[in-house]
């Protein structure tokens, strides 16, 4: 049996879901619509396995905005560490300006 974890959250406009280890992403206007779209997205992603008789167990993990914010901050900290390693002689302010220019 395949075990699939899906994170579900509301982005302010839509309900969104993304696979934790699998490349699955879907959205819905309502939570119920999201659940239906998750079933469809997982079925499409694991189509070959399901055709071979494999069962897929889906666990939906709700996350809130605070958790999403913490993850974003941690990702930015890691990115800052990578940039400091790549550019050891450049100050943080210079890195910020370079980052803004890139975006």
Image (cartoon, rainbow, N blue to C red):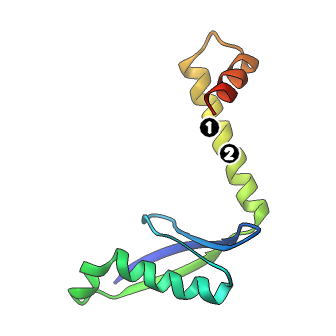
Please report contact status of discs 2 and 1: CB closer than 8 Å, yes or no.
yes
Instruction: Please give left or right for residue 53 compared with residue 22 in the image.
Output: left
The quadrant holding residue 87 is top right
Task: For mark 2, give the secondary structure.
Answer: helix
How far apart, in angstroms, are the residues tagged by discs 2 and 1? 6 Å
Classify 29 as above or below 81. Answer: below
**Residue depicted at x 63% and y 9%:** 89
Q: Position of residue 52 (x, y in %)?
A: 20, 86
Asked where in the image residue 22 lies, by quadrant, the reply is bottom left
Residue assigned mark 1: 78
Q: Is residue 18 above or below residue 59?
A: above
Q: How many marks?
A: 2
Foreground residue among 2 and 95: 95
Which residue occupies 68% across, 37% down? 77
x and y percentages locating residue 93 in the rendered image: 76, 19
From what the image shows, is residue 17 above or below residue 69?
below
- Disc sitting over residue 102 in the figure: none
**Which quarter of the figure has residue 102?**
top right
Q: Which residue: 69% across, 70% down? A: 63
- Residue found at the far top of this picture: 89
Mark 1 closeness class: few <14, some 14–19, many ≥20 residues within 10 Å: few
Residue that mark 2 sits on:
74
Q: Residue at x 33, y 88 (%)?
A: 55
Image quadrant holding the N terminus, namely bottom left
Image height check: is 43 above or below 24? below
Q: Look at the numbered disc 1 and give the secondary structure of its residue.
A: helix
Q: Position of residue 50 (x, y in %)?
A: 28, 86
Q: Nearer the viewer, residue 7 or 98?
A: 98
Image quarter in which the C terminus is found:
top right
């Amino acid at each position: 049996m395949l075990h699939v974890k899906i994170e579900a959250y509301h982005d302010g406009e839509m309900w969104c879901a993304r696979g934790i280890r699998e490349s699955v992403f879907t959205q819905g206007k309502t939570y119920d619509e999201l659940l239906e779209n998750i079933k469809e997205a997982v079925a499409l992603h694991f189509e070959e396995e399901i055709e071979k008789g494999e069962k897929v167990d889906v666990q939906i993990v709700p996350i809130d905005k605070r958790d999403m914010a913490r993850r974003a901050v941690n990702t930015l900290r890691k990115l800052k560490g990578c940039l400091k390693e790549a550019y050891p002689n450049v100050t943080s302010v210079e890195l910020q300006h370079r980052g803004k220019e890139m975006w």
